[in-house]
Image (cartoon, rainbow, N blue to C red):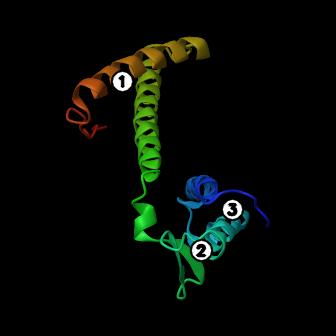
Amino acid sequence: MKLECTKEEFKVLMDLVYAGNLLINGPRSKEARIEKYLDMEQKMFAMAKEEFGLEELVEYDEEFEEYMPTHEYEEDEFNEYIDEYDTSVFWEELVMRLARRDALNYAGDVDQNVSPAALRQMQLKWEEQYEEEIADNGIMNLKIVKIEE
């Protein structure tokens, strides 16, 4: 692959490829990884070291037979964006899933023939309540309560 860019531009591109592969392959086991994304990351890491003088950011691991980010790269400021994304997704998913659960429970207890539109409206109301609670208190008031049947 031939790229014409500055060292700084290459670093930005490498960050994007690393973040993309992390998103796609991060939750997968080694055997389940999607190779085309891993391969592109490996190409970028090799180029970083061999062509762009960014050897402080990547190193070749003989045991795993692949390039790995160094500790310095993992501490790079761009990783803060990944952390922000993870945090945002966590809270959005938590709110949405709790609200959906509560709307379905409420509908099941009160009106089993509720329309999808009405169910969605209930869910939105629950989402607002959870968003407000989490904004005010974080997870301090969240508890797991076992329901006895």
**Residues at circles 3 and 1 in contact by the CB criterion of under 8 Å:** no
Q: In which quarter of the image is the C terminus?
A: top left
Count residues near mark 3 (Cα–Cα under 10 Å), then give few for <14, some for 14-19, many for 20+. Answer: some
What SS does tag 3 mark? Answer: helix
Q: Residue 37 carries which label?
A: 3
Q: Classify 58 as above or below 88.
A: below
| Residue picked out by circle 2 | 49
The residue shown at (29%, 25%) is 135
Kind of residue at disc 3: Tyr
The residue shown at (43%, 57%) is 76
Q: Classify 30 as above or below 104.
A: below
The residue shown at (65%, 57%) is 6
Determine the CA span between mark 2 and mark 1. Answer: 44 Å
Determine the CA span between mark 2 and mark 3. Answer: 19 Å
Kind of residue at disc 1: Glu
Side (left or right) of 95 relative to 134: right
| Residue picked out by circle 1 | 131
| Percent position of residue 64, x then y | 55, 83
Count residues near mark 1 (Cα–Cα under 10 Å), then give few for <14, some for 14-19, many for 20+. Answer: some
Q: Quadrant of residue 28?
A: bottom right
Kind of residue at disc 2: Lys
